[in-house]
Image (cartoon, rainbow, N blue to C red):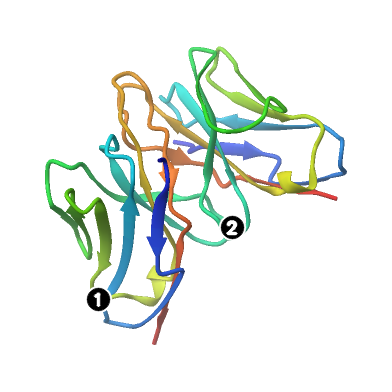
Amino acid sequence: DAGVTQSPTHLIKTRGQQVTLRCSPKSGHDTVSWYQQALGQGPQFIFQYYEEEERQRGNFPDRFSGHQFPNYSSELNVNALLLGDSALYLCASSWTWNTGELFFGEGSRLTVL
Amino acid sequence: QQQVKQSPQSLIVQKGGISIINCAYENTAFDYFPWYQQFPGKGPALLIAIRPDVSEKKEGRFTISFNKSAKQFSLHIMDSQPGDSATYFCAASKENTGTASKLTFGTGTRLQVTL
């Protein structure tokens, strides 16, 4: 049973570019949440998708957008990259009727130069 | 309002000792308090969680103590082992029926267990 898988694992972009990160949830899970983890900090909630709709959103600008596909996989898009967007982006999946445990992937490490 | 404060930032414990990490929250609406363990290069993994209807929960060597009136909760790792060396995050959320948790994390504690 595969856990949460994310791609790519590492990527380097320059300021102003756009990036797309991908996530496949754990088998049987229907909800995907995205978190940003800056170096030495705790993860911060970006947004959550269920039934292909954004259900909850954290305090992130509109440059951060997402999508969920019918197979429950998800993408995180960040436009007009800033140096401060450099972070580990974590995807977490869950089954929406089990509101407790989130299963995290290993993350995508984004470096913006 | 949404902040979760965690201390200490780092902790060194001898093998066999007790590791204690503390967290405090502000939002009284929070009703789910998990602890996550993160190894370098890996995503966080759920270690243990508690809801405010109990004051303590124990799973193996890991115990959460919860003080609702003080809005504080702590993680105790008994008989700490070198394999426990990792970063630990406390978190909190308000659970809503039919919606997955939106976690607010603490800033993390880097634990090192020495031989």
Give the spatial CA distance, label 1 vs label 2: 25 Å
Q: Amino acid at mark 2?
A: Gly
Residue B44, placed above or below residue B10: above
Report the front residue among A79 and B49. A79
Residue B7: x, y in percent?
39, 65
Chain under numbered label 2: B
Q: Which mark is residue B41?
A: 2
Residue B75: x, y in percent?
28, 61
Report the front residue among A61 and B83. A61
Category of crowding for the residue at label 1, using alpha-carbon neighbours closer than 10 angstroms: few (below 14), some (14–19), many (at least 20): some
Category of crowding for the residue at label 2, using alpha-carbon neighbours closer than 10 angstroms: few (below 14), some (14–19), many (at least 20): few
Callouts 1 and 2 close, C-beta under 8 Å: no
Q: Amino acid at mark 1?
A: Asp
Residue, x 33% and y 40% (percent of image)? B27
Q: What residue did someone put label 1 on?
A: B79
Report the front residue among A38 and B27. B27
In terms of image quadrants, where is residue B100? top left
Disc 2, SS: loop
Residue B21: x, y in percent?
33, 66
Q: Residue furthest left?
A: B54
Quadrant of the image containing the N terminus of chain B? top left
Chain under numbered label 1: B
